Amino acid sequence: IFLGAIVLGFLIPFFIFYFIFLFDNKVHSREDIEKHSLSIVGEIPFFDIDENEKVFNNPDDRSLISESSRMLMSNLKYLEKKDSQSNVILVTSSIKGEGKTLTALNLALSFSSVGKKVLLLGADLRNPQLHKYINSDKNVPGLSDYLVNNSFEWKKNIINPFDHQSLDILLSGPI
């Protein structure tokens, strides 16, 4: 009985962990991506700094966030379609708080710092965050107003918070 209990004591947890790892389909590390022969476009490191330092609005900035955004930008240039006049980049995730808005803003600033004309659309209609990084009002008319009323003049609501950049922003508008 003791021998059977010891064997079951090892086998039951083994099979539980085996099935947990078998059905785990999340990406936990860089090796998880590379073993499926997928490529990594860029990697933004985690940093714990002040909210105002997360956005680089100086094109000559050489901070950690600016350099990682420039690296992501240069890697994305290899994926551009050469025959089109404009390209669309979508930054998305299904989980709140992963840094989608910050990544999109810094990527847009990277492209505009090398002379590209950029229009950043704040398309998070449920929980907009873009206004926090540019010190703007949350209820400025924007994309949601255009989606409700097609005759809405959206071009009049484009803002340029970084006057030295060729970056225009259309906020998501009121919730």
Image (tube, rainbow, N blue to C red):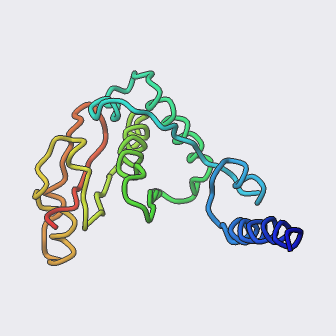
**106 and 162: which one is in front?**
106
> In the displayed structure, does residue 142 sit left or right of residue 86?
left
Q: Residue at x 21, y 45 (%)?
A: 132
- The quadrant of the picture occupied by the C terminus is bottom left
* Left or right of residue 13, residue 85 in this image: left
Residue sitting farthest toward the front:
1
Q: Position of residue 11 (x, y in %)?
A: 81, 69
Quadrant holding the N terminus: bottom right
Is 152 positioned to the left or the right of 71 in the image? Answer: left
Residue in the picture at 21% in, 43% down: 160
Residue lying at the far right of the rendered structure: 3
Above or below, comparing residue 161 to residue 18 in the picture: above
The image shows a total of numbered marks equal to: 0
User: Which residue is at a point 37% across and 59% down the rendered structure image?
Assistant: 96
Identify whether 117 is placed above or below 86. above
Place residue 153 in its image quadrant. bottom left
Quarter holding residue 59? top left
Instruction: Give whichever of 115, 99 is nearer the camera.
Output: 99
Q: Position of residue 88 (x, y in %)?
A: 45, 59
Where residue 146 sits in the image (x, y, percent)? 18, 71
Residue 171 falls left or right of residue 117 = left
Along the line of sight, which residue is nearer the eye, 129 or 160? 129
Report which quarter residue 32 is drawn in.
Answer: bottom right
